Each structure stands twice: as structure tokens, then as C-alpha cells.
């Protein structure tokens, strides 16, 4: 099973008034990790998923421990937890070693913006996502 890790910097502006990373910042972290995963890991295969169009259908985040600003990046480990003909679910663990700050999942769907409607995953997209398939959900 292949997984992708992205090391995300924590920015001072990511913190809220209580001195912890704000929940909205987590969505940005997950987005950065997804873009890194799809563009860097498959510049000719995976970029079609963004180039040809895709939309986020659902996000779920479970906060496990407070994350505060620091100079070291936080690791975001991700994999494909579900792959259907018209959706892909990506699960994440935001962590430092054994310390888990959050678990999350994003469901995305390919979308044809020119036609204004959903589309099916291409064979190329399926092949890319299958390399990272693992039906183990992020720890709840």
C-alpha cells in the first residue's frame, strides 16, 4: 500500500485567538496536501483530475489534539480510501510520529465545467488513484 506524506508548514496566521491552529486552517492544510499529492506525484496522470475539473463533495475532520504554531512542519499522511466510478475519497492523518492532531477525509468528484455537470473518472485517473488505494479509514 502506497501512501503520500506532505510536510506542511504552520504559519503564525493559522492560529486563532486561543493560540491554537484554527479549524479553517486545517482545510487549507488538507488542500495543500491534496494538490501536492496529485500534481507532484503524477504530473502527467493526476493533473488531469484538476485540469479537466473536479469538485469537493464532502469534508470530515476529527480534531484529536491541539496544534500550535512552531517552526517544524506537521506531517499529513494520505491515501485513497474509496474509489468509485465518479468519486474518490482521500483519508488523512495530521501527525508528528505517534502524536495525531487530526484525522480527516475528503470526497472529490470529477466535474466537467464546460458542460456544467459531473463526469466519470477517466481510466488514467483510476490508474493513478489505485496506486494509493487502501480501504483502511483514518482512525476515528
Image (tube, helix red, strand yellow):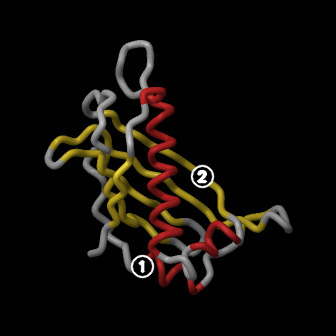
Q: Position of residue 87 (x, y in %)?
A: 56, 66
Mark 1 burial class by Cα count in 10 Å: few <14, some 14-19, many 20+:
some
Q: Quadrant of residue 48?
A: bottom right
* Nearest the eye: 18 or 83: 18
Distance of label 2 from label 1 (alpha carbons): 20 Å
Extreme-top residue of the structure: 17
Drawn side of residue 85 relative to residue 65, left or right:
right
Q: Residue at x 58, y 86 (%)?
A: 123
Residue, far left: 98
Total tally of numbered discs in the picture: 2
Image point (52%, 56%), residue name: 107
User: Helix or strand or loop: what does disc 1 sit on?
Assistant: helix
Nearest to the observer: residue 74 or residue 134: 74
Q: Tell which residue pokes out farthest to the right in this image.
A: 115
In which image quadrant can residue 60 be found? top left
Q: Position of residue 33 (x, y in %)?
A: 44, 55
Q: Is disc 2 surrounded by few (<14), some (14 to 19) or many (20+) residues within 10 Å?
A: few
Identified at 66% across, 62% down, the residue is 54
Percent coordinates x, y for residue 6 in the rendering: 36, 57
The local secondary structure at tag 2 comes to: strand
Residue receiving disc 1: 130
Is residue 127 shown left or right of residue 117? left
Query: Counting residues from the N terminus, which is met first, the one under dot 2 or under dot 1?
Result: 2
| Residue at 31% over, 40% down | 102
Quadrant where the image shows the N terminus: bottom left
Q: Which residue is mark 2?
A: 57
* Quarter holding residue 69: top left
Above or below — where is 58 with respect to 122?
A: above
Amino acid at each position: 500500500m502506497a501512501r503520500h506524506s506532505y510536510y506542511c508548514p504552520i504559519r503564525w496566521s493559522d492560529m486563532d485567538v486561543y493560540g491554537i491552529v484554527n479549524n479553517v486552517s486545517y482545510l487549507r492544510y488538507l488542500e495543500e496536501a491534496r494538490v501536492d499529492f496529485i500534481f507532484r506525484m503524477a504530473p502527467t496522470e493526476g493533473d488531469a483530475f484538476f485540469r479537466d475539473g473536479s469538485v469537493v463533495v464532502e469534508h470530515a475532520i476529527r480534531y484529536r489534539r491541539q496544534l500550535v504554531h512552531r517552526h517544524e512542519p506537521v506531517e499529513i499522511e494520505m491515501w485513497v480510501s474509496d474509489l468509485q466510478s465518479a468519486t474518490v475519497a482521500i483519508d488523512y492523518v495530521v501527525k508528528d510520529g505517534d502524536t495525531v492532531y487530526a484525522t480527516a477525509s475528503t470526497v472529490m468528484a470529477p466535474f466537467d465545467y464546460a458542460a456544467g455537470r459531473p463526469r466519470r473518472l477517466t481510466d488514467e485517473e483510476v490508474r493513478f488513484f489505485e496506486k494509493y488505494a487502501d480501504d483502511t479509514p483514518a482512525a476515528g
